Image (cartoon, rainbow, N blue to C red):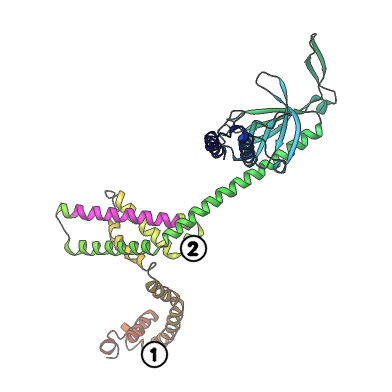
Amino acid sequence: RLHQARKAQERFDAILELAGLEKDADNLANTEFDREKSKFEDTVTFDMMPANLNSNHLLGRVPSIKSRLLERDAEKLDSEGRWQARRVILTSRRVILTLPSEDIVRDSIPLCEIERVHVNKSEEQSNGSKPLAIFDSGFGTIIGEDSWRKLNIFTREDGYNSGMTYHLRVEDEEDQLFLQKCIEEMRLRALEQQEVVRASCLKTMKRRLRKFYEMRAYQSLTTLLILLNFLQNVVQAEYQANDPFVQYCFDCLDTSLTSFFIFDISLNLVCNWFWDFFEVGWNVLDLAIVIVSVANLFYTNMPGVSSLRCFRAFRIVRLFGRLGPLREIVNALAFSVWPVANAFFVLFIVMAVYAILATNTFCQRDSMSFGSFSKSLFTMFQVCTGDGWASAVTR
C-alpha cells in the first residue's frame, strides 16, 4: 500500500506540474499519502512480521490492546549487567519486551520456545531477612536493601532466541508469581496449539494421500501391474528359460514390479495408519506378500530364501481385495465357513454313531474294515465319498 501510494503521488505530481497547480494540490497529495500510510500501519501488526528479523525497528510494533493478555512494568538485565526499565506484554503467542514510552518491540520471546520460567527466591523469602544489594549513588558505593523479585525465562537453544536467558525483576512478589503463572499457562497453551497445528497438517496430508490412493486410475494401474506380474510368473514357469539374457529380463521386471508394490503398500500404510490398516485382512495379506517378495529380492543367496520364489505366485491373490466382485465372492466364502463347519460336525456325529454300531456288529466278520472304531469310521467315510465302497466294503 505504501508503494502504491508513492506511485500514485508521483503520477499526481507529474500531472500537477503540467497544469501548473503544484502549490494548490500539495496539501491534498500529502493528506492522501498519510491516509494510506496510516491504514498500512494499522493493518500490519507484530504477529505479521517475519520471525527472523532481529533489528529493533524491524521487529515491528506491539500488538493492539485487544491482543494483549497481560501488561506489567519490570526491569531487564542487559549484557553489561545493568537493569533497564521494560514493559512486559503477554499475548497468546509471545512475550514482548519494550520500553515504557515506546511501541516498538525490543525483545520477542515465542511462548512455544520457552523451556521454563524460574522464580528466584530472595533471602527474605527463605530466612525472613531482607536481602542486600549494591547501589551506585554517584558519591560512592552504598549497600542497601533490595526489594526486587527476580524472574528468569529460559528459551530453547534451537529456537528464535538461540537459548538466550532473559532475567527480569519486578517490585512486588505478587506480580512476580502472577507473571510466572500467566507465562507458564500461556506457554502450555501455545505448545498444545502447536501440536494441534502439526496434527492438523498431518491429517491434511493423510487425507490427500488417501484421495490419491483411492483414485480410480491408480487402482486400475495397480490391478494391471498385478496381472502383469502373474503373467510373468506363468510364462517363466512354462518355458523355464535357461538363457542368461532372458533370465536377466525376468529379474529386472520382477524388481520393477516389486518396487512398485513396496510403494503401494507404504502409501497404504501412511494413509491408514495404524488400526485402520491392520484391521482389514486384505491389507495384512498384501503386507505379508510384499515382505516375502522383498526378502526374495535382497537375500537371493541365503539358504532357504530361494524357496520363497514360489510365493510370488500368490501376488495374484492381492487382486481379490481390489476388485469388488471378487472381493464379495471371497468374503461370502469366508462367512460360510462356520455354517459349513457345523454341517460337517453333524455329519461326523452321524458317522461316529454308525461306526460304533458297525464295530460291534461286524468286527468278527471283517476285521480289516470294522476291527476298531477308527477303521469303522474310515469305512463310513468311504461309504460317504463313494471311494470303492461297492467293490471293497459291500463285497
Residues at marks 1 and 2 touching, judged by CB atoms closer than 8 Å: no
Q: Residue at x 67, y 34 (%)?
A: 96
User: Is residue 113 toward the left or the right of residue 352 in the image?
Assistant: right
Specify whether residue 383 is painted magenta. no
Q: x, y (%) of residue 211?
A: 45, 60
Say which residue appears at 35% left-offset and 83% top-offset: 381
Quarter of the figure with residue 122: top right
Looking at the image, residue 250 sits to the left or right of residue 349; the answer is left
Query: In this view of the protein, which residue sits in the foreground, 218 or 325?
Result: 218
Identify the residue at image location x=35%, y=81%: 378
Q: Secondary structure at mark 1?
A: helix
Q: Amino acid at mark 2?
A: Glu
- The residue indicated by pointer 2 is 279
Residue 361's label in the rendered image is 1
Taking the image as drawn, is residue 77 in sight? Answer: yes
Task: Residue 352 in the image: state x and y as whole percent.
Answer: 42, 83
Residue 174 position within the rendered picture, expressed as x and y whole percent measured from the top left: 81, 35
Query: Magenta span covers which residues?
Result: 247-269
Q: How many numbered tags mark residues here?
A: 2
Nearer to us of marks 1 and 2 is 2
**Three-letter amino acid code at the position of disc 1:** Thr
Confirm whether residue 291 shows in the render: no
